[in-house]
Image (cartoon, coloured by chain):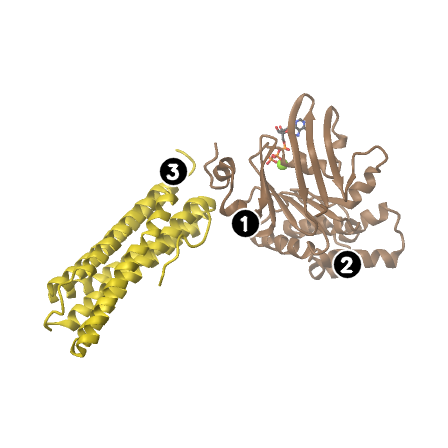
Amino acid sequence: MEFKMQTRKLEFYYGKVRALSKITMGIEEHQITALIGPSGCGKTTFLRLLNRMNDVISGTHLAGDVLLDGQNIYAPQVDVVEVRKRVGMVFQQPNPFPKSIYANVAFGPRMLGLNNKAKLDEVVERSLRAAALWDEVKDNLGKSGMLLSGGQQQRLCIARVLAVEPEVILMDEPCSALDPLSTLRIEELMRDLKTNYTIIIVTHNMQQAARVSEWTGFFLLGELVEYNKTGEIFQRPKDKKTEDYITGRFG
Amino acid sequence: MAPREKFDQHLKELQDEVLVLGSMVGKAIARSMNALKERDLELAKEVMSGDTGIDHKRLDIEERCIELIVTQQPVASDLRTIIAVLNIIVDLERIGDHAEGIAKIVLMIGNEPPLKPLIDLPRMAEKTQDMLRRSLDAFIDRDPETAVNISNEDDEVDELYDQVYRELITFMLEDPRTITRATRLIWAAHNLERSADRVTNICERVVFATTGKMGETGESRY
Ligand SMILES: Nc1ncnc2c1ncn2[C@@H]1O[C@H](COP(=O)(O)OP(=O)(O)OP(=O)(O)O)[C@@H](O)[C@H]1O
Ligand SMILES: [Mg+2]
């Protein structure tokens, strides 16, 4: 079984401080993989390594491989822009640009050279529909993205990622700023999206990980302690540390 | 205070309540068998009215379980404990029903002349009670090995049942006038045989609560 993404003995250092040690993990295509673990255990660091977002932080150092469809994304000849197009990211705080809804979604495709108005219209509509936002904004595409509710803004950010047709979507606590209903809508959306995309989500919400994901990885102090089917992790974790964390007896 | 101290306290209370229910049920079996042996109709009636208490206790425990699920969103071993409790109390309640069944038979027999002195039936009852008590201890101790062993002891109850059954069939063949009385005793034995089977279910839940593995611990011949 070929993984969509794979890390092999991945290590990462901020200066001399090791944030991740020897993470070997395979991400299944068209599945949702959840990463859980206490604050500071390296979830965000790991996620950002999957689309080279950590490249910009100076003084960092990486060892090991990150493979996308079997190709090392850190190989010298690889184009970072291409990697980030194929592996998109949604952040914790919804961060629409201070521009119209339309311009937010069209931003990526324009950057990639698409200027045909009809084609852009089509991409914007398709992306907003896929992000389950179209019906709410279709009559107001000129309205500023900043004026949407938090849950709508997050779906706008998802539409913005979808517009460049990625293969993998990384989500770093995408619902932590949202109310329960908006959270459930994003989760529903994730389940729809996985037909066409591979999704990796970092969440502090254990119920959310249990609800949406097929696979769950538990990180602790920069290590991947346990990685298994979500049902297994939440019913019969193998490692005592996983058990303590998910049952709230950690620390 | 440890993060889950209150919850741990509730889980412990929950399991204490299971022991209380278990001892109510064990007593019901013992008393119903005494009633049968001694033809004590009053005692039989008490067992029957006592069954309501067992039913209430079971519902009370079930409610506690649901409340813990709703308020604590348990996972892993916490979840398995609660699910095991939910299953065990059903088996306990049913064993209570079997005791009630025996008490009803006592009332049916009324003052008919005894068919024979009862020896194997009380043995079946004792064995079942013993297995029941130890299975609940194994639950509290999270001791799956002991649970599997207890489960295997079900064979002894099955053998006693066989013996009782064969003996009573012989009575019936030799003298058809005994058919009614012998049939009643077979029912009583059947209630005990079923009760012991229920204990093996409890043993399976001990294994599940401890290891997360589901499945039969042993095979009953019936
Ligand atoms: N830019 C940075 N420079 C130096 N150290 C950093 C930087 N970013 C993160 N770290 C350190 O790396 C470790 C892992 O941090 P990371 O943000 O990956 O954790 P996390 O699991 O995402 O935590 P949280 O759940 O709080 O978001 C932490 O000890 C953190 O202090
Ligand atoms: Mg983080």
Label 3 sits on residue: B5
The span from disc 3 to disc 1 (Cα, nearest Å) is: 26 Å
Quadrant in which ligand 2 is drawn:
top right
Query: Helix, strand or loop at disc 1?
Result: helix
| Rendering coords of residue A66 (x, y %) | 74, 37
Residues A137 and A166: in front is A166
Q: What hue represents chain A?
A: brown
Quadrant (top left/top right/bottom left/bottom right) for the C terminus of chain B: bottom left
Front tag of 3 and 1: 1
B196 relative to A161, above or below: below
Q: Which disc, if any, is residue A126?
A: 2
Say whether disc 2 or disc 1 marks the residue closer to the N-terminus: 2
Q: How crowded is mark 1: few (under 14 residues within 10 Å), some or many (20 or more)?
A: some
Label 1 sits on residue: A231
Front tag of 2 and 1: 1
The residue type indicated by label 1 comes to: Gly
